[in-house]
Amino acid sequence: MAFIRCRNERFGFKMRGRTPAIPSNIQVVCSGCLPTEVCKESEISVLVFSVTVVKFRDSQQELCMTPNQRYLFDINGYLHIPQVLNAEELAAAQAAVDRYISTPEEELPEGFSRSEDGKYYANGFAFDKALEALVVHPGIWPIIKEFTHDCPAFSRGTLIVDTHQHEPFGLHCAREDYGWQSTRFDTREGRIFCDDFVIFPYFDDVFPGDGGLLVVPGSHKAAFDRPPRLFNCGVIANREDIPDSVVNVTPRAGDVVVMTEMLVHGTLKWQPQNRQRRLLVLRYRPQFKGQSRVTDVVRNRLSPQIRELMDYGHYTDIKEIIKTDVVSLT
């Protein structure tokens, strides 16, 4: 019998048989934290962290969304997944973000720039390999594949640096901006299909009262248009003004938020004057829904795997990258 300490440190669990080799990207938790997935082949009870279920079959691992995550995303329209990035990945990403922010405009590579207010950094995902790797991080790759029915395409990725000097973003969603027919959310064969979604890896802690992301849980399934005057016409200035139906999501550094663009969302003004809210906005859709907006000069910096992921494809096309459970960039 092998005993493995839960990451929560309040619990542990025993494993029957030999102890498997746990990949470095897998964090073991116990039944006090998440439901158990039992692998009959190896007679080992393995519990999952964040979004991935791990089943050991003939020394291979299969990665997929958990039933918990499917249910929560289905009813809420978003997922807050803690500790997706490990300490090494987070440190490398934070260092890359620091380099992008501190590089003078005239010294930035072609294809990279910042907005006048210093909030948006174009093609942030491509500035450094540590950031590019997050596009297909093992903690989110199963979600990307499932939401696109194994036909994924990466559209673009922007770095956001939010400070107390920036104005909040009013509540909105793709359906309100572009029409009811612009985005689709469905469930078939025990899986979720979502043809326009974003993933936010966070590089800084967000605490209650700081501000940041606002969501209206369940609004992705609304059968009626949002009344214009509801939620103060979509502009929420202070934490004290947040209506009961609106949630302020407060991720920590290394956490990830996954959200359908059908969900009504916005931002609350960032309050701390000595801290920033830095995150990537990674956009995905099925491969048959439009072309990537990333220019060739930026694409040429990317690994072959990410370039393939950005390619347009027919409904029946199967990309090589989809055949891989864990994507390694070359």
Image (cartoon, grey):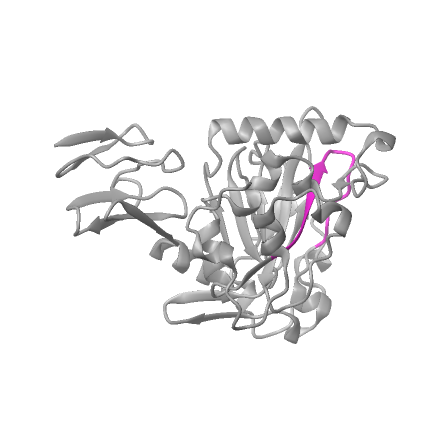
**Residue 211 percent across, percent down from the top left:** 64, 39
Is the residue 229 above or below the residue 90 in the image? below
Relative depth, front residue between 60 and 73:
60
Q: Quadrant of the C terminus?
A: top right
In this image, 65 relative to 245: left or right? left
**Residue 240 percent across, percent down from the top left:** 63, 43
Give the residue at x 68% y 59%. Answer: 172
Q: How many marks?
A: 0
Give the residue at x 81% y 40%. Answer: 110
Q: Quadrant of the N terminus?
A: top left
In the image, farthest residue toward the top: 274
- Membership of 193 in magenta stretch: no
Regarding residue 227, the answer to whether it shows in the image is no
Stretch in magenta: 154-170
**Residue 92 percent across, percent down from the top left:** 57, 28
Is the residue 136 above or below the residue 224 in the image? above
**Residue 235 percent across, percent down from the top left:** 72, 53
Relative depth, front residue between 278 and 60:
60
